[in-house]
């Protein structure tokens, strides 16, 4: 898609202002413009290069969605991605999720932390801050939120930002810039300890005894064949 760009200057409230602009034709053939004001010619040229890069990499959507907020992404995901599951005639899931309550809880925490922050302003530092914030949060029982819960939330957040990247609402998913294991640390999760009930212990012992008898019978059979 062709485009043109440049810098113009104008006076705003008696002060000199420089405006970076990019113009293109949309799919309907209408001429569209994108402007960014700057305090100096050098900054305006920097904005022009930024607009050109956005347009080349993501097209019209990338240009026009630069002010999209996290709250708007959350609303999109709640409607299109984390909605109630829909199944086809053969019982196969075609969209949505089986348990919306989990994602509703995640979205609630995300919205409270990121609010109306612009998607493109979310960096690795913001994701790290969210993770640390959640690890310090107290539950209704007075304990802190465990690592496995926070890891699940971070996985949901990563998927949401991937959705934004796929739709060209952001140019890069900030998770891709994080160091390995920095934001989602499964190694810190405690291994689940399972305590067997009395009945389960009896069944386990009976199973082991059965296997022992089978091995004994097999050995005896082999010995008889050799004789």
Image: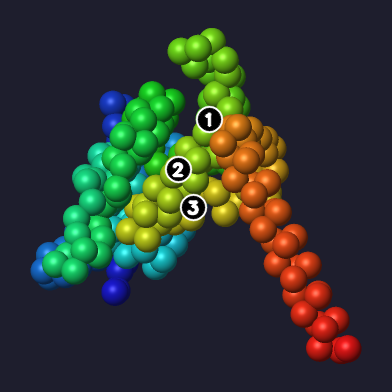
Crowding at label 3, few (<14), some or many (≥20) Cα neighbours within 10 Å? many
Q: Which of marks 3 and 2 is nearer the N terminus?
A: 2
Label 2 secondary element: helix
Q: Is residue 63 above or below residue 123?
A: below
| Quadrant assignment for the N terminus | bottom left
Label 1 Cα neighbours within 10 Å, binned few <14 / some 14-19 / many ≥20: some
Q: What is the C-alpha distance between the residues marked 3 and 1?
A: 16 Å
In percent of width and height, residue 172 lies at 48, 55
Q: Nearer the viewer, mark 3 or mark 2?
A: 2
Tell me the quarter of the picture where residue 125 sits. top right
Q: Which residue is drawn at 57% across and 54% down?
A: 176
In percent of width and height, residue 224 lies at 82, 84
From the image, tell me which residue sits under label 3.
173
**Quadrant of image for the C terminus:** bottom right
Tags 2 and 1 in contact by the CB under 8 Å rule? yes
Task: Name the quadrant containing residue 165.
Answer: bottom left
Residue 20 makes an appearance in the image: no
Residue drawn at the location 17% of the way across and 65% of the way down: 88
Q: What element carries label 3?
A: loop
Q: Are marks 3 and 1 in contact (CB under 8 Å)?
A: no
Left or right of 7: which side holds 138? right
Residue that carries the numbered disc 2 in the rendered image: 157
Colouring mode (rainbow / by chain / secondary structure / one colour): rainbow
As drawn, the label of residue 130 is 1
**Residue 120 or residue 77, whichever sits in front:** 77
User: Which one is nearer the viewer's eye here, 101 or 130?
Assistant: 101
């Amino acid at each position: 898609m062709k485009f043109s760009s440049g810098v113009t200057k104008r006076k705003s409230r008696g002060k000199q202002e420089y405006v970076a602009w990019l113009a293109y034709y949309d799919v309907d053939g209408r001429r569209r413009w994108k402007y960014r004001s700057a305090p100096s010619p050098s900054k305006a040229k920097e904005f022009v290069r930024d607009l050109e890069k956005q347009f080349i990499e993501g097209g019209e959507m990338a240009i026009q969605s630069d002010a999209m907020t996290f709250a708007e992404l959350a609303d999109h995901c709640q409607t299109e991605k984390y909605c109630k599951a829909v199944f086809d005639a053969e019982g196969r899931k075609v969209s949505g999720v089986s348990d919306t309550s989990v994602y509703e809880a995640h979205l609630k925490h995300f919205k409270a932390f990121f609010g109306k922050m612009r998607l493109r302003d979310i960096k690795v530092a913001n994701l790290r801050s969210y993770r640390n914030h959640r690890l310090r949060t107290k539950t209704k029982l007075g304990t802190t939120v465990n690592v496995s819960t926070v890891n699940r939330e971070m996985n949901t957040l990563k998927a949401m930002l991937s959705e934004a990247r796929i739709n060209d609402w952001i140019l890069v998913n900030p998770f891709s810039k994080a160091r390995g294991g920095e934001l989602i640390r499964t190694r810190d999760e405690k291994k689940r300890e399972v305590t067997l009930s009395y009945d389960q212990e009896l069944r386990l012992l009976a199973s082991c005894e059965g296997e022992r008898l089978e091995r004994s019978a097999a050995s005896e059979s082999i010995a008889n064949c050799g004789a």
